[in-house]
Image (cartoon, helix red, strand yellow):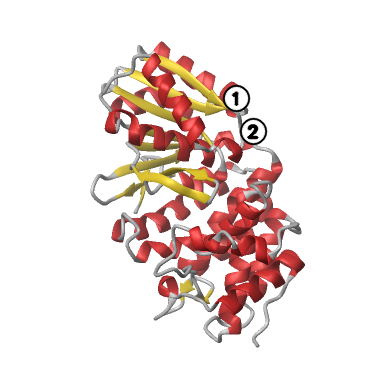
Protein backbone atom coordinates (compact mmCIF):
# COMPACT_ATOMS: atom_id res chain seq x y z
CA UNK A 1 0.00 0.00 0.00
CA UNK A 2 1.26 3.49 -0.90
CA UNK A 3 1.06 5.93 2.02
CA UNK A 4 0.97 9.69 1.50
CA UNK A 5 2.43 12.52 3.51
CA UNK A 6 0.48 15.49 4.85
CA UNK A 7 1.02 17.44 1.63
CA UNK A 8 -0.64 14.66 -0.38
CA UNK A 9 2.50 13.57 -2.19
CA UNK A 10 3.20 9.83 -2.39
CA UNK A 11 5.97 9.08 0.05
CA UNK A 12 6.30 5.46 1.13
CA UNK A 13 5.26 1.85 0.66
CA UNK A 14 4.85 -0.48 3.61
CA UNK A 15 6.19 -3.97 2.88
CA UNK A 16 4.54 -6.50 5.17
CA UNK A 17 5.59 -10.03 6.02
CA UNK A 18 7.59 -11.50 8.89
CA UNK A 19 9.35 -8.21 9.59
CA UNK A 20 7.68 -5.25 7.92
CA UNK A 21 9.58 -2.21 6.73
CA UNK A 22 9.02 1.02 4.85
CA UNK A 23 10.29 2.00 1.43
CA UNK A 24 10.49 5.80 1.47
CA UNK A 25 10.63 7.63 -1.85
CA UNK A 26 10.99 11.37 -2.43
CA UNK A 27 13.28 14.35 -2.96
CA UNK A 28 15.84 15.47 -0.38
CA UNK A 29 15.71 12.29 1.68
CA UNK A 30 19.49 11.96 1.90
CA UNK A 31 19.54 15.13 4.01
CA UNK A 32 17.38 13.36 6.59
CA UNK A 33 19.30 10.06 6.51
CA UNK A 34 20.65 10.20 10.11
CA UNK A 35 17.20 10.73 11.61
CA UNK A 36 15.68 7.92 9.53
CA UNK A 37 18.47 5.52 10.51
CA UNK A 38 18.01 6.37 14.17
CA UNK A 39 14.24 5.81 13.87
CA UNK A 40 14.59 2.19 12.73
CA UNK A 41 17.77 0.73 14.25
CA UNK A 42 19.38 1.11 17.70
CA UNK A 43 22.82 1.41 16.13
CA UNK A 44 25.74 3.28 17.64
CA UNK A 45 28.07 2.64 14.72
CA UNK A 46 27.58 2.49 10.97
CA UNK A 47 29.52 0.69 8.25
CA UNK A 48 28.76 2.67 5.11
CA UNK A 49 29.34 0.66 1.91
CA UNK A 50 29.44 2.20 -1.55
CA UNK A 51 31.21 1.70 -4.87
CA UNK A 52 33.97 3.81 -6.38
CA UNK A 53 31.53 5.81 -8.53
CA UNK A 54 28.86 6.51 -5.91
CA UNK A 55 31.08 7.05 -2.85
CA UNK A 56 32.23 10.58 -3.80
CA UNK A 57 28.76 11.57 -5.05
CA UNK A 58 26.48 10.24 -2.29
CA UNK A 59 28.40 7.86 -0.02
CA UNK A 60 30.90 10.27 1.52
CA UNK A 61 28.32 13.08 2.03
CA UNK A 62 26.01 10.53 3.71
CA UNK A 63 28.86 9.38 5.97
CA UNK A 64 29.57 13.01 6.90
CA UNK A 65 25.91 13.54 7.84
CA UNK A 66 25.87 10.40 9.96
CA UNK A 67 29.08 11.43 11.75
CA UNK A 68 27.65 14.89 12.33
CA UNK A 69 24.64 13.27 14.00
CA UNK A 70 26.86 11.37 16.44
CA UNK A 71 27.28 7.97 14.76
CA UNK A 72 30.69 6.32 14.61
CA UNK A 73 31.15 5.66 10.90
CA UNK A 74 33.56 3.53 8.90
CA UNK A 75 33.66 3.89 5.12
CA UNK A 76 34.04 0.92 2.79
CA UNK A 77 34.44 1.25 -0.96
CA UNK A 78 34.79 -1.32 -3.73
CA UNK A 79 35.40 -0.99 -7.46
CA UNK A 80 32.18 -0.17 -9.34
CA UNK A 81 30.68 -2.86 -11.56
CA UNK A 82 29.15 -6.32 -11.54
CA UNK A 83 32.65 -7.83 -11.59
CA UNK A 84 33.02 -6.79 -7.93
CA UNK A 85 29.93 -8.68 -6.74
CA UNK A 86 31.97 -11.70 -5.67
CA UNK A 87 32.83 -13.74 -2.61
CA UNK A 88 36.27 -12.13 -2.65
CA UNK A 89 34.76 -8.65 -2.22
CA UNK A 90 32.38 -9.97 0.43
CA UNK A 91 35.34 -11.40 2.37
CA UNK A 92 37.27 -8.13 2.14
CA UNK A 93 34.34 -6.02 3.29
CA UNK A 94 33.56 -8.39 6.15
CA UNK A 95 37.18 -8.30 7.31
CA UNK A 96 37.13 -4.49 7.14
CA UNK A 97 34.06 -4.38 9.41
CA UNK A 98 35.85 -6.61 11.90
CA UNK A 99 38.97 -4.44 11.77
CA UNK A 100 36.80 -1.36 12.34
CA UNK A 101 35.51 -2.96 15.54
CA UNK A 102 31.82 -3.06 14.66
CA UNK A 103 29.74 -5.12 17.07
CA UNK A 104 26.11 -6.17 17.17
CA UNK A 105 25.17 -2.58 17.91
CA UNK A 106 26.20 -1.64 14.36
CA UNK A 107 24.32 -1.47 11.10
CA UNK A 108 25.31 -1.47 7.44
CA UNK A 109 24.21 1.46 5.31
CA UNK A 110 24.36 0.54 1.61
CA UNK A 111 24.53 3.57 -0.69
CA UNK A 112 24.44 2.80 -4.40
CA UNK A 113 22.96 0.69 -7.16
CA UNK A 114 21.89 -2.93 -7.37
CA UNK A 115 25.39 -4.36 -7.00
CA UNK A 116 25.87 -2.39 -3.78
CA UNK A 117 22.49 -3.26 -2.29
CA UNK A 118 22.99 -6.97 -3.05
CA UNK A 119 26.60 -7.11 -1.85
CA UNK A 120 26.28 -4.92 1.25
CA UNK A 121 23.04 -6.68 2.16
CA UNK A 122 24.88 -10.01 2.07
CA UNK A 123 27.63 -8.59 4.28
CA UNK A 124 24.98 -7.49 6.79
CA UNK A 125 23.19 -10.85 6.58
CA UNK A 126 26.32 -12.79 7.49
CA UNK A 127 28.29 -10.41 9.73
CA UNK A 128 28.05 -11.62 13.35
CA UNK A 129 25.19 -13.85 12.09
CA UNK A 130 23.24 -10.83 10.97
CA UNK A 131 23.08 -7.11 11.70
CA UNK A 132 20.60 -4.55 10.32
CA UNK A 133 20.99 -3.07 6.86
CA UNK A 134 19.61 0.27 5.69
CA UNK A 135 19.31 0.32 1.91
CA UNK A 136 19.90 3.69 0.22
CA UNK A 137 19.43 3.00 -3.50
CA UNK A 138 20.73 5.64 -5.91
CA UNK A 139 19.80 4.04 -9.28
CA UNK A 140 16.49 3.18 -10.93
CA UNK A 141 17.39 -0.52 -10.80
CA UNK A 142 17.99 -0.43 -7.07
CA UNK A 143 15.01 1.83 -6.33
CA UNK A 144 12.36 -0.09 -8.27
CA UNK A 145 13.63 -3.59 -7.54
CA UNK A 146 16.99 -4.60 -6.05
CA UNK A 147 16.76 -2.85 -2.67
CA UNK A 148 13.29 -4.22 -1.83
CA UNK A 149 12.36 -7.80 -1.06
CA UNK A 150 15.26 -8.92 1.11
CA UNK A 151 17.33 -10.79 -1.49
CA UNK A 152 21.10 -10.38 -1.05
CA UNK A 153 24.01 -12.21 -2.60
CA UNK A 154 27.01 -12.45 -4.90
CA UNK A 155 27.83 -13.95 -8.28
CA UNK A 156 29.99 -17.05 -8.75
CA UNK A 157 31.58 -18.61 -11.85
CA UNK A 158 28.57 -20.92 -12.31
CA UNK A 159 26.14 -18.01 -12.55
CA UNK A 160 24.56 -14.89 -11.11
CA UNK A 161 23.31 -14.55 -7.50
CA UNK A 162 23.89 -18.21 -6.68
CA UNK A 163 25.29 -17.52 -3.20
CA UNK A 164 23.28 -15.30 -0.89
CA UNK A 165 20.67 -14.97 1.83
CA UNK A 166 17.28 -13.46 2.50
CA UNK A 167 17.87 -10.47 4.79
CA UNK A 168 15.16 -7.82 4.83
CA UNK A 169 16.22 -4.18 5.23
CA UNK A 170 15.34 -2.08 8.25
CA UNK A 171 14.23 0.64 5.86
CA UNK A 172 14.75 1.61 2.20
CA UNK A 173 15.45 5.30 1.53
CA UNK A 174 15.19 6.25 -2.14
CA UNK A 175 16.05 9.88 -2.90
CA UNK A 176 14.95 10.51 -6.50
CA UNK A 177 17.35 13.48 -6.72
CA UNK A 178 20.18 10.94 -6.95
CA UNK A 179 18.86 9.76 -10.32
CA UNK A 180 20.10 12.97 -11.97
CA UNK A 181 23.69 11.85 -11.31
CA UNK A 182 23.26 8.59 -13.23
CA UNK A 183 24.64 8.15 -16.75
CA UNK A 184 21.78 8.17 -19.29
CA UNK A 185 22.37 4.52 -20.18
CA UNK A 186 21.97 3.36 -16.58
CA UNK A 187 18.60 5.08 -16.26
CA UNK A 188 17.20 3.06 -19.13
CA UNK A 189 18.80 -0.16 -17.86
CA UNK A 190 17.17 0.23 -14.46
CA UNK A 191 13.73 1.05 -15.84
CA UNK A 192 13.58 -2.39 -17.44
CA UNK A 193 12.58 -3.73 -14.01
CA UNK A 194 9.65 -1.29 -13.86
CA UNK A 195 8.53 -2.62 -17.25
CA UNK A 196 8.73 -6.13 -15.81
CA UNK A 197 6.44 -5.25 -12.92
CA UNK A 198 3.87 -3.83 -15.31
CA UNK A 199 4.17 -6.77 -17.70
CA UNK A 200 3.42 -9.37 -15.03
CA UNK A 201 1.05 -7.49 -12.73
CA UNK A 202 -0.48 -4.24 -14.00
CA UNK A 203 -1.14 -3.12 -17.58
CA UNK A 204 -1.84 0.46 -16.38
CA UNK A 205 1.63 0.67 -14.82
CA UNK A 206 3.12 -0.66 -18.06
CA UNK A 207 1.16 1.93 -20.06
CA UNK A 208 2.28 4.76 -17.75
CA UNK A 209 5.92 3.88 -18.38
CA UNK A 210 5.16 3.73 -22.13
CA UNK A 211 3.65 7.21 -21.99
CA UNK A 212 6.46 8.82 -19.96
CA UNK A 213 9.69 7.36 -21.30
CA UNK A 214 11.20 10.77 -22.03
CA UNK A 215 10.48 12.15 -18.56
CA UNK A 216 11.78 8.99 -16.90
CA UNK A 217 15.01 9.04 -18.88
CA UNK A 218 15.39 12.71 -17.90
CA UNK A 219 14.84 11.70 -14.23
CA UNK A 220 11.84 14.00 -13.78
CA UNK A 221 11.36 13.82 -9.98
CA UNK A 222 7.56 13.63 -9.92
CA UNK A 223 7.26 11.03 -12.68
CA UNK A 224 10.17 9.01 -11.28
CA UNK A 225 8.65 9.04 -7.79
CA UNK A 226 5.33 7.72 -9.09
CA UNK A 227 6.88 4.91 -11.14
CA UNK A 228 9.19 3.85 -8.29
CA UNK A 229 6.39 3.83 -5.73
CA UNK A 230 4.01 1.94 -8.01
CA UNK A 231 6.69 -0.62 -8.90
CA UNK A 232 7.61 -1.14 -5.25
CA UNK A 233 3.94 -1.47 -4.28
CA UNK A 234 3.43 -4.12 -6.97
CA UNK A 235 6.52 -6.04 -5.86
CA UNK A 236 5.52 -5.75 -2.20
CA UNK A 237 2.16 -7.33 -3.00
CA UNK A 238 3.97 -10.41 -4.30
CA UNK A 239 6.67 -10.54 -1.61
CA UNK A 240 4.09 -10.40 1.18
CA UNK A 241 2.46 -13.56 -0.19
CA UNK A 242 5.71 -15.50 -0.70
CA UNK A 243 8.57 -13.93 1.22
CA UNK A 244 11.15 -16.66 0.59
CA UNK A 245 10.36 -17.46 -3.04
CA UNK A 246 8.77 -20.83 -2.46
CA UNK A 247 6.24 -20.40 -5.24
CA UNK A 248 4.27 -17.34 -6.32
CA UNK A 249 7.16 -14.89 -5.93
CA UNK A 250 8.85 -16.59 -8.87
CA UNK A 251 6.71 -14.51 -11.22
CA UNK A 252 9.13 -11.67 -10.41
CA UNK A 253 11.71 -13.66 -12.36
CA UNK A 254 10.02 -12.87 -15.69
CA UNK A 255 12.88 -12.48 -18.17
CA UNK A 256 15.49 -13.33 -15.55
CA UNK A 257 16.01 -17.05 -16.12
CA UNK A 258 17.08 -16.45 -19.71
CA UNK A 259 18.36 -12.93 -18.99
CA UNK A 260 20.78 -14.08 -16.30
CA UNK A 261 22.06 -16.79 -18.65
CA UNK A 262 22.72 -14.19 -21.36
CA UNK A 263 24.33 -11.84 -18.82
CA UNK A 264 26.63 -14.58 -17.53
CA UNK A 265 27.38 -15.69 -21.08
CA UNK A 266 28.62 -12.17 -21.85
CA UNK A 267 30.90 -12.37 -18.79
CA UNK A 268 28.79 -9.52 -17.36
CA UNK A 269 29.81 -7.09 -20.08
CA UNK A 270 26.14 -6.77 -21.05
CA UNK A 271 24.11 -4.58 -18.69
CA UNK A 272 21.62 -6.30 -16.40
CA UNK A 273 18.69 -4.38 -17.83
CA UNK A 274 19.61 -5.19 -21.42
CA UNK A 275 20.03 -8.87 -20.57
CA UNK A 276 16.66 -9.03 -18.80
CA UNK A 277 15.07 -7.15 -21.71
CA UNK A 278 16.30 -9.86 -24.07
CA UNK A 279 15.08 -12.50 -21.61
CA UNK A 280 11.60 -10.97 -21.43
CA UNK A 281 11.36 -10.85 -25.23
CA UNK A 282 12.52 -14.46 -25.49
CA UNK A 283 9.99 -15.64 -22.90
CA UNK A 284 7.22 -13.68 -24.62
CA UNK A 285 8.22 -15.33 -27.90
CA UNK A 286 8.11 -18.76 -26.26
CA UNK A 287 4.64 -18.05 -24.92
CA UNK A 288 3.36 -16.91 -28.28
CA UNK A 289 4.89 -19.90 -30.07
CA UNK A 290 3.23 -22.23 -27.56
CA UNK A 291 -0.14 -20.48 -27.88
CA UNK A 292 -0.08 -19.38 -24.24
CA UNK A 293 0.65 -15.67 -24.73
CA UNK A 294 -1.59 -13.24 -26.62
CA UNK A 295 -0.26 -12.47 -30.09
CA UNK A 296 1.56 -9.12 -30.28
CA UNK A 297 2.63 -9.15 -26.62
CA UNK A 298 6.30 -9.65 -27.48
CA UNK A 299 6.28 -6.92 -30.08
CA UNK A 300 4.80 -4.41 -27.61
CA UNK A 301 7.38 -5.38 -25.01
CA UNK A 302 10.25 -5.11 -27.49
CA UNK A 303 9.15 -1.68 -28.66
CA UNK A 304 9.10 -0.22 -25.15
CA UNK A 305 12.32 -1.92 -24.09
CA UNK A 306 14.17 -0.65 -27.14
CA UNK A 307 13.10 2.89 -26.27
CA UNK A 308 14.74 2.41 -22.86
CA UNK A 309 17.98 0.59 -23.70
CA UNK A 310 18.28 1.00 -27.47
CA UNK A 311 18.99 -1.77 -29.96
CA UNK A 312 20.74 -4.50 -27.97
CA UNK A 313 23.35 -6.57 -29.74
CA UNK A 314 25.50 -9.15 -28.04
CA UNK A 315 28.08 -11.65 -29.18
CA UNK A 316 26.58 -14.29 -26.89
CA UNK A 317 25.28 -17.40 -28.64
CA UNK A 318 22.30 -19.41 -27.47
CA UNK A 319 24.63 -22.34 -26.82
CA UNK A 320 26.82 -20.20 -24.53
CA UNK A 321 23.80 -18.86 -22.66
CA UNK A 322 22.14 -22.25 -22.29
CA UNK A 323 25.22 -23.58 -20.48
CA UNK A 324 24.30 -21.40 -17.50
CA UNK A 325 20.66 -22.48 -17.29
CA UNK A 326 21.33 -25.77 -15.50
CA UNK A 327 23.01 -23.90 -12.62
CA UNK A 328 20.31 -21.23 -12.34
CA UNK A 329 18.76 -20.98 -8.86
CA UNK A 330 15.31 -21.23 -10.45
CA UNK A 331 15.97 -24.78 -11.72
CA UNK A 332 13.56 -27.43 -10.39
CA UNK A 333 13.97 -31.16 -11.07
CA UNK A 334 16.89 -30.32 -13.32
CA UNK A 335 14.84 -28.03 -15.57
CA UNK A 336 14.87 -24.22 -15.76
CA UNK A 337 11.69 -22.34 -14.92
CA UNK A 338 10.55 -19.41 -17.02
CA UNK A 339 7.57 -17.09 -16.62
CA UNK A 340 5.02 -16.96 -19.43
CA UNK A 341 2.51 -14.15 -19.84
CA UNK A 342 -1.09 -14.45 -20.87
CA UNK A 343 -1.01 -10.81 -21.91
CA UNK A 344 0.58 -7.55 -20.72
CA UNK A 345 -0.33 -7.22 -17.05
CA UNK A 346 -1.14 -10.87 -16.44
CA UNK A 347 0.91 -14.02 -15.98
CA UNK A 348 -0.44 -17.08 -17.77
CA UNK A 349 -3.04 -18.84 -15.64
CA UNK A 350 -2.24 -22.46 -14.92
CA UNK A 351 1.38 -22.20 -16.08
CA UNK A 352 3.17 -19.00 -15.12
CA UNK A 353 6.06 -19.60 -12.76
CA UNK A 354 5.54 -23.38 -12.72
CA UNK A 355 6.24 -23.74 -16.43
CA UNK A 356 9.32 -25.74 -17.47
CA UNK A 357 9.82 -25.25 -21.23
CA UNK A 358 11.10 -27.92 -23.60
CA UNK A 359 14.76 -27.38 -24.44
CA UNK A 360 14.12 -26.86 -28.15
CA UNK A 361 11.59 -24.09 -27.49
CA UNK A 362 14.01 -22.35 -25.11
CA UNK A 363 16.92 -22.63 -27.54
CA UNK A 364 14.85 -21.41 -30.49
CA UNK A 365 13.57 -18.35 -28.63
CA UNK A 366 17.03 -17.47 -27.34
CA UNK A 367 18.64 -17.90 -30.75
CA UNK A 368 16.12 -15.64 -32.46
CA UNK A 369 16.32 -12.90 -29.84
CA UNK A 370 20.11 -12.99 -29.59
CA UNK A 371 20.49 -12.79 -33.35
CA UNK A 372 17.88 -10.09 -33.89
CA UNK A 373 18.01 -8.16 -30.60
CA UNK A 374 15.04 -6.19 -29.33
CA UNK A 375 13.82 -5.51 -32.84
CA UNK A 376 12.48 -9.04 -33.11
CA UNK A 377 8.70 -9.40 -33.28
CA UNK A 378 7.73 -12.79 -31.86
CA UNK A 379 5.51 -14.84 -34.11
CA UNK A 380 3.06 -17.61 -33.36
CA UNK A 381 4.28 -20.85 -34.94
Question: Is 4 situated left or right of 84 in this image?
Answer: left
Residue 318 image-quadrant placement = bottom right
Q: In this view of the protein, can residue 151 be seen by the observer?
A: no
Residue at 69% in and 68% down: 369
Q: CA distance from mark 1 to mark 2?
A: 8 Å
Question: Is 193 situated left or right of 130 in this image?
Answer: right
Specify few, some or many for label 1: CA neighbours under 10 Å numbering under 14, 14-19, or 20 or more: few
Viewer-proximal residue among 192 and 353: 353
Residue at 51% in and 64% down: 254
Residue 78: mark in rendering: none
Query: Are discs 1 and 2 less than 8 Å apart at CB?
Result: yes
Question: Is 42 situated left or right of 64 in this image?
Answer: left
Image coordinates of residue 316 in percent, x first then y, are: 71, 58
Q: Quadrant of the N terminus?
A: bottom left
Residue at 48% in and 36% down: 87
- The residue identified by callout 1 is 57
Residue 6 image-quadrant placement = top left
Q: In this view of the protein, can residue 199 be seen by the observer?
A: yes
Image coordinates of residue 231 in percent, x first then y, are: 47, 54
Residue 181: mark in rendering: 2
Amino acid sequence: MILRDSAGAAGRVRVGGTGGYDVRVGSGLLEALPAMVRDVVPARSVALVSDSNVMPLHGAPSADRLEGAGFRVSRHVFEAGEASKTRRTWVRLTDELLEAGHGRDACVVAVGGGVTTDLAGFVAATYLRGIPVVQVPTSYLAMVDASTGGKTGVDVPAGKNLVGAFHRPAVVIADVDALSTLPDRERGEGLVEAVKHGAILDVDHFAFVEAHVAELLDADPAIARRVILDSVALKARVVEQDEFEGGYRQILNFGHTLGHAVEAGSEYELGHGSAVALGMCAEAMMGENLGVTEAGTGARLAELLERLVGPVRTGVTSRAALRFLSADKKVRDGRPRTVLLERIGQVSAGTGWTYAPPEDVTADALERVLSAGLRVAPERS
